[in-house]
Image (spheres, rainbow, N blue to C red):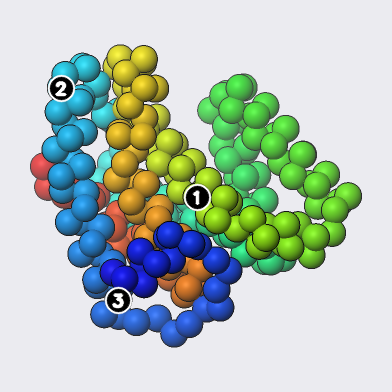
Amino acid sequence: MTELLSFLKNPVYAQNKKPNSKEFISLLMIYFLTILPLGFIIYAFCKFFNITHKEIILTPWMKLLVGVILAPIYEEFIFRSLLKFKKINILLFITTLFGFIFYSISKSRTEVTTFLSIFVLSFLCLLIFTSRTQIESYISSRFKYFFYASILLFGLLHATNFTGNLYAIIAFSLILGSPQLVLGAILGYIRMNYGLVYSILFHMIVNTSIVFSLLGS
């Protein structure tokens, strides 16, 4: 707990260390104990402002596949891989974005396809005209801003999972996405200290508990 809070106050580039199972369990307990009161707050907001969680119609097996395996992988690739600007992480990031582009095309989501295409093109231009070491140096010198941005974007993205009163969703997006803000902070800590594989693993464990609770309800 102390190490986590210390890191979140001043996030810095860190060398990967050997994972500690006890710390993993402690972080899981911190996450679940934190989101319990947040869940009640979100429930109250949703009731008061007539907001509901979007229902994703999938078979139980598809929910397991998407929620437990695919979502943790692509979300970690998108939001936390580039916190360490290495060649393999750049490749994972770009590949994932191309996957989203092809998926958007298949679903005829023109706006999303256009936005992602422009973003990928801009990112590739940045890589072409700026050396990777220069970008990595820039990120490391301003790392805490990139780290906090990854948490914020992760939380705001999940606020879009709600439907209903649009103005309330926008106004209270940080509250609606607060469980993911907490999760993003913990995953960022794990990613920087233990590596991307372990942030994916932690994400999968969290999502497994959520998916099974939804399947049981």
Task: Judge left or right: residue 181 versus residue 52.
Answer: right
Within 10 angstroms of label 2, few (less than 14), some, or many (20 or more) residues?
few
Quarter location, residue 49: top left
Task: Judge left or right: residue 77 versus residue 164.
Answer: right
User: Residue at position x 62%, y 22% from top?
Assistant: 110
User: Residue at position x 67%, y 60% from top?
Assistant: 141
The local secondary structure at tag 1 comes to helix
Rendered-image quadrant of the C terminus? top left
User: Is residue 75 placed above or below 205 in the rendered structure?
Assistant: above
Nearer-the-camera pick, 148 or 75: 148
Where residue 188 appears, as percent x and y from the top left, is 46, 60
Q: Do the numbered discs 2 and 3 sit on residues whose CB atoms are within 8 Å?
A: no
Where residue 12 appears, as percent x and y from the top left, is 55, 66
Dot label at residue 47? 2
Where residue 137 appears, as percent x and y from the top left, is 74, 63
Q: Count every numbered label the image shows and give the total.
A: 3
Hey, what amino acid is under mark 3? Glu
If you read the primary sequence from the N terminus, does the residue marked by circle 2 or circle 1 appear first?
2
The local secondary structure at tag 3 comes to helix
C-alpha gap between disc 2 and disc 1: 30 Å
Nearer-the-camera pick, 78 or 212: 78
The single residue placed furthest to the bottom in the displayed view is 18
User: Is residue 49 placed above or below 71 in the rendered structure?
Assistant: above
Hey, what amino acid is under mark 1? Tyr
User: Residue at position x 26%, y 80% from top?
Assistant: 22
If you read the primary sequence from the N terminus, does the residue marked by circle 2 or circle 3 appear first?
3
If you read the primary sequence from the N terminus, does the residue marked by circle 1 or circle 3 appear first?
3
The residue under label 3 is 23
C-alpha gap between disc 1 and disc 3: 22 Å
Hey, what amino acid is under mark 2? Lys
The residue under label 1 is 148
